[in-house]
Structures are given as C-alpha cells and as structure tokens.
Image: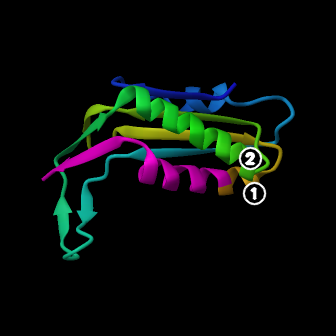
C-alpha cells in the first residue's frame, strides 16, 4: 500500500489519503503542502510576494530517495502505510505541491512520522523549488 510518485498534474489530497488506509489502523495524518503567497527571506528577513513556483526533480532518483525515506520512517515509527506525491512544473499560489499521508494504529506515531518525512524529503530528495517574485 506504500507509494511514492511525481506528477505534473494537480494532486487530489483526499484520494492520496484514502489510498493508505488499512482496516487495522485508527489514524491517518495527511500533510497538504501548497504554494503560499508570501515568503520571508531567511537571510534578510524581508517578506516577498510570490507570483508562482516552479519545481524540478531528478525523477528516477527522487522516487528512489522518497522510497528510502518511507522505509526508514517505517523502521522508526509504528506506522502501517505511507503515500507521498510531489508535483513538478509550474504551480500557482494555493496549488498543492506535496502530499504525505500516513496511516498508523495510533495518531501520535502518524504525526511524528509525517513531520519527520517532510523535513527529510526537503533535505535529501532531489526536488528543487524556484520561487518567482
């Protein structure tokens, strides 16, 4: 039931969440990461207005690295199934860029695994975001 995918099409958040739900679990935590209009520059503190985003990926490697993260999350947390879909190409403000959905017997592990997965995905997976101001 685990899956890791890249897509150039809009992501249906609910369908991602429903794909990971097994009957033995009592919680699904889903992160819907989307393009925001304002971003604070980490160096200057200046707030910039974003027009749109462009995501690029090294597709084959990105999916392999996402699967490695899923495998590691399942070792670290008591979770059942994980789904990750990341969008590439141009995204308008408000459009979903990434969905991570985790099913677990208990919500505490699902929340912890979701937080860990998004942090590690942004840190290690070869997907690059360009913000256009």
Q: Comparing marks 2 and 1, which lies closer to the viewer?
A: 2
Q: Is residue 69 visible?
A: yes
Quarter of the image holding residue 19? top right
Residue 30 is covered by the magenta coloring: no
Crowding around mark 2 (Cα neighbors within 10 Å: few <14, some 14 to 19, many 20+) is few
Q: How is the image coloured?
A: rainbow
Tell me the element at label 2: helix
Residue for point 66% across, 52% down: 113
Left or right? Give the position of 5 relative to 129.
right
Q: Which residue is mark 2?
A: 75
Q: Which residue is mark 1?
A: 108
Residue for point 62% across, 33% down: 17
Quarter of the image holding residue 42? bottom left
Please report the bounds of the magenta region as a residue range: 113-133
Q: Is residue 94 visible?
A: no
Crowding around mark 1 (Cα neighbors within 10 Å: few <14, some 14 to 19, many 20+) is some
Q: Is residue 28 above or below residue 23?
A: below
x and y, in percent, of residue 79 in the image: 76, 44
x and y, in percent, of residue 41 in the image: 23, 68
């Amino acid at each position: 039931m685990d899956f890791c995918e890249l897509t150039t099409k809009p992501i249906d958040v609910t369908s991602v969440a429903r794909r990971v739900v097994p009957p033995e679990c009592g919680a699904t935590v889903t992160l819907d990461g989307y393009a925001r209009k304002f971003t604070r520059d980490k160096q200057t503190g200046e707030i910039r207005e974003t027009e749109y985003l462009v995501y690029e990926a090294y597709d084959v490697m990105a999916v392999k690295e996402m699967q490695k993260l899923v495998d590691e999350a399942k070792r670290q947390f008591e979770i059942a199934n994980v789904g990750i879909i990341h969008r590439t190409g141009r995204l308008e403000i408000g459009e979903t860029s990434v969905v991570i959905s985790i099913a677990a017997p208990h919500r505490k592990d699902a929340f912890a695994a979701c937080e860990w997965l998004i942090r590690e995905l942004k840190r290690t997976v070869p997907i690059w975001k360009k913000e256009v101001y």
